[in-house]
Image (cartoon, rainbow, N blue to C red):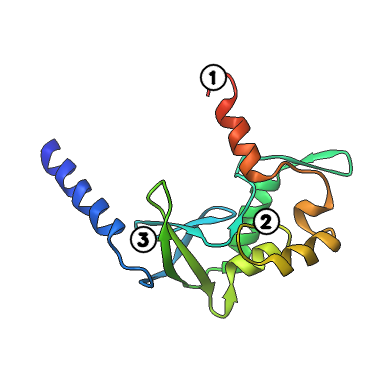
């Protein structure tokens, strides 16, 4: 029985990795964090953005805030229970689909960066500049860039 499970899991992983670029994945999305979601059994990282990690904290007006949870809430609000459609662009090193995603006509990556709840990661540079100048989201205080936060978390004792 365990052998069948391992074989089935291997076939599933192979199929996910071999979905062609441009393939469309759509349906009800479950938000994982500010730049990741799941549709069915497919984990998706939104292309062009990097949001604070779920447990990442930032500082605003001298107070610590849960900016990672704020980012996840913002993505949840943008989706608003509507179906999400994602067009696959790549696969990341963790096997997740990297995709451009929309809820109706809302480009989720663009909206996350424009609201200041995600940083540009190869896309949406104008939206980031505007959010920064307007001090929206993470730009309203002090924060560690998500990539640096992840690096620090990995190198922390006990990690």
Question: In this orientation, which residue lies closer to the viewer: 126 or 55?
Answer: 126
Separation of residues labelled 3 and 1 (CA atoms): 33 Å
Q: CA distance from mark 2 to mark 3?
A: 26 Å
Q: Position of residue 150 (x, y in %)?
A: 59, 38
Q: Residue furthest front?
A: 122
Q: Which residue is mark 3?
A: 40
Residue 118 against residue 114 in the figure, above or below: above
Look at discs 2 and 3 and give the one toward the viewer: 2
Q: Give the residue number, with chain letter if any, for mark 1.
A: 158
Quick one: label 3 or label 1, which is nearer the N terminus?
3
Q: Secondary structure at mark 1?
A: loop
Q: Secondary structure at mark 2?
A: strand
Distance from the alpha carbon under mark 1 to that under mark 2: 28 Å
Q: Is residue 61 left or right of residue 90?
A: right
Q: Residue at x 54, y 79 (%)?
A: 104
The residue mark sitting in front, 3 or 1, is 1
For the point 36% across and 68% down, the residue is 21
Query: Dot 2: within a 10 Å radius of its alpha carbon, few (fewer than 14), some, or many (20 or more) residues?
Result: many
- Which numbered tag is attached to residue 119? 2
For the residue labelled by badge 3, is the local secondary structure a helix, a strand or a loop?
Answer: loop
Q: Position of residue 26 (x, y in %)?
A: 40, 71
In the rendering, which numbered label is found on residue 23?
none
| Residue drawn at point x = 38 percent, y = 72 percent | 22
Say above or below: 23 vs 54.
below
| Residues under numbered marks 2 and 3 in contact, where contact means CB atoms less than 8 Å apart | no
Q: Residues within 10 Å of mark 3 (few under 14, many from 20)?
A: few
């Amino acid at each position: 029985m365990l052998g069948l499970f391992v074989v089935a899991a291997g076939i599933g992983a192979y199929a996910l990795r071999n979905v062609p670029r441009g393939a469309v994945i759509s349906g009800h999305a479950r938000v994982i964090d500010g730049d990741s979601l799941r549709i069915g059994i497919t984990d998706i990282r939104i292309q062009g953005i990097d949001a604070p990690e779920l447990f990442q904290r930032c500082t605003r007006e001298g107070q610590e805030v849960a900016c990672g949870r704020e980012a996840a809430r913002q993505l949840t609000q943008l989706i608003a229970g509507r179906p999400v459609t994602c067009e696959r662009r790549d696969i990341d090193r963790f096997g997740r689909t990297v995709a451009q995603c929309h809820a109706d006509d809302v480009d989720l990556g663009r909206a996350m960066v424009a609201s200041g709840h995600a940083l540009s990661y190869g896309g949406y540079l104008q939206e980031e500049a505007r959010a920064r100048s307007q001090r929206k989201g993470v730009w309203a205080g002090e924060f560690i860039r998500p990539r640096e936060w992840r690096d620090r978390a990995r190198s922390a004792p006990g990690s």
